[in-house]
Amino acid sequence: MQGVFNYISSGYLLQLNFLFLVFSLLFTSVIAYSVEYSPLRQFFKTNLTTIYLKNFVTLSMLISFFCFLINIFLFFNYIVQYLNSSLVLNSFYSLNFTTFIFYKNSILDSLYFNFSIDLFGFVLLFLSYIVGFLSLLALDTRLYWKNFRYIFTFNIFVVIVYLYTTTSNLLLFFLFYEFLLIPSFLFVYFVSPSRRAIQASIYFVIWTQLGSLLVLSACSYIIYVVGSSEFDIIRRFYFSQTETYILYSLLFFGFGFKVPIWPFHYWLTKTHVEAPSGFSIYLSGFLVKSALYGFYKISTLLSFEFNTSFFILITLLGVFDSSLKMWGQTDIKKLVAYGTIQEMNLIYLVFCWGDSSIIIAGIIFTATHAFLSCLMFYLVDCVYRRYHTRSIVEINGILHITPNLAVSILFMTVFFAGLPGTIKFISEFYIFSSFLEISPVMCLTLMLIANAIGLIGFSKVWFNLVFGGFTKYTKYLPMDLSYREFYMIFMNFFFLFFLSYLPLVFF
């Protein structure tokens, strides 16, 4: 009985939270328009109204996040009771997590919006709050606290993520996936320090649109053949072997442009190098996860049983290529970019494999990668602001000059290495153990590439920066971490530690 109550409460609370965000967005838009452009602007004191708007939007986002935390508690409480029931305990891993939870009699039925969500959708919503907040803080704190536009953009972003993760209509799903580019571009446009950063964001938009063209082709064919865009109807439709292979290929490469897969990952390294660190945090911590979620969501709609060895080979090449590239990098931000590419290809491999026993491990690994990439890019930003360079040739002896920063870097490498007890080790353990039962040779090869070649290439650069010979700086001596930087780094470490206990719910 309590499980049913948690199920119903979780559904209604999530919908009310969404409606609250929409109301906050509309109210803020009307007031902002009245202040700036309407004939009523003489009745407003611009500076005072802006302060009130900033406080209102900030408070509304905090309330929304608090409600979502309650929502997560109810949802996972429901999952625990669901797992403890004797009827489904033995068949848990055979469940289709795309339809793991579905809310009927929705509040939004009057708006013709079928409200549904799955476990991966909850994870993506959680990342949208945390990663979006971290990226805004990293972009420009000084301007952020003086202008409500950045929090307003954050509100737009969270509303779109809600729509993206809760719709059960394929056409709307694709449209909301594309709408995520709007706040992505605004994040950079409002606070970009240079024209090169704006060019990098445009470069990112152009390349991802190439992949979106393939996804649009697949979605259009599915809607045309099935005659409906509803997920439930598409799931019951039978596609031929040839149709399934073509659709899967379009989805794999379409979403793979943004993940990114080999050999379409060069746009990501260029964007990371040119863009500000806040956008790098947002891009790697959330945006590429939205493409991963899109591939997972649509591919599970197709009833297919065919050999995916070709697609697995591409993801293996992505892991191998990025692991080797980490050995020859002199820019630490580009090094971190290749580290994130390696992990994303490994996660993409999990969903291409399609084995239900490792789906949850892949979802947890996705959340792990989000916070780990946020931590890595922020530490790169901390190093750059102190030494005014990202070249490993010019930076050394961080431990002697800024010891707190050096210790944070060492802990970051520990989490990236997947030391036993960390969340990365737990998720990789379940992934590789499942691979070992299916293909021992491929599993051992993958472990050698990812956890030996790539890890050594990644760690040796950071160890050289931290433990290198001390160089006396005559012009200036960099300051150690500030309270704000401690706060940002602590948040990432906190969620990485918190996620370490999450697999206990499932395994």
Image: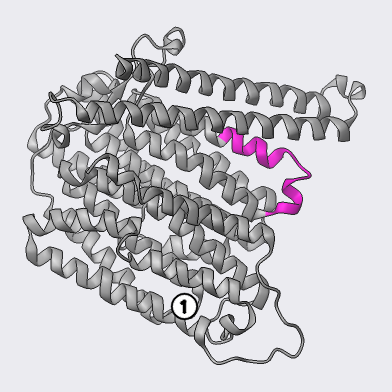
Q: Is mark 1 on a helix, strand or loop?
A: helix
Q: How was this image coloured?
A: one colour
Residue 152 part of the magenta-drawn span: yes
Give above or below for 12 relative to 288. Answer: above
Rendered-image quadrant of the C terminus: top left
Q: Residue at x 28, y 64 (%)?
A: 318
Q: Note whether residue 199 is visible.
A: no
Q: Which residue is drawn at 50% across and 74% down?
A: 332
Main SS class of the magenta portion in the image: helix
Residue 199 figure quarter: bottom right
In the rendering, at what x and y percent does residue 129 appear?
53, 39
The amino acid pointed to by label 1 is Trp
Residue 344 relative to residue 89: left or right = right
Rendered-image quadrant of the N terminus: top left
Q: Report the label total.
A: 1
Give above or below for 202 relative to 171. Answer: below
In the rendering, at what x and y percent does residue 50 appear?
81, 34
Residue 197 relative to residue 68: left or right = right
Give above or below for 32 relative to 205. Answer: above
Residue 27 figure quarter: top right
Q: Residue at x 29, y 46 (%)?
A: 503
Q: Note whether residue 227 is visible.
A: yes
In the rendering, at what x and y percent does residue 484 appear?
67, 57
Q: Which residue is drawn at 48% across and 80% down?
A: 330
Where does the magenta region start and end? 140-156
Residue 77 part of the magenta-drawn span: no
Give above or below for 207 relative to 146. Answer: below
- Residue carrying label 1: 462
Residue 147 figure quarter: top right
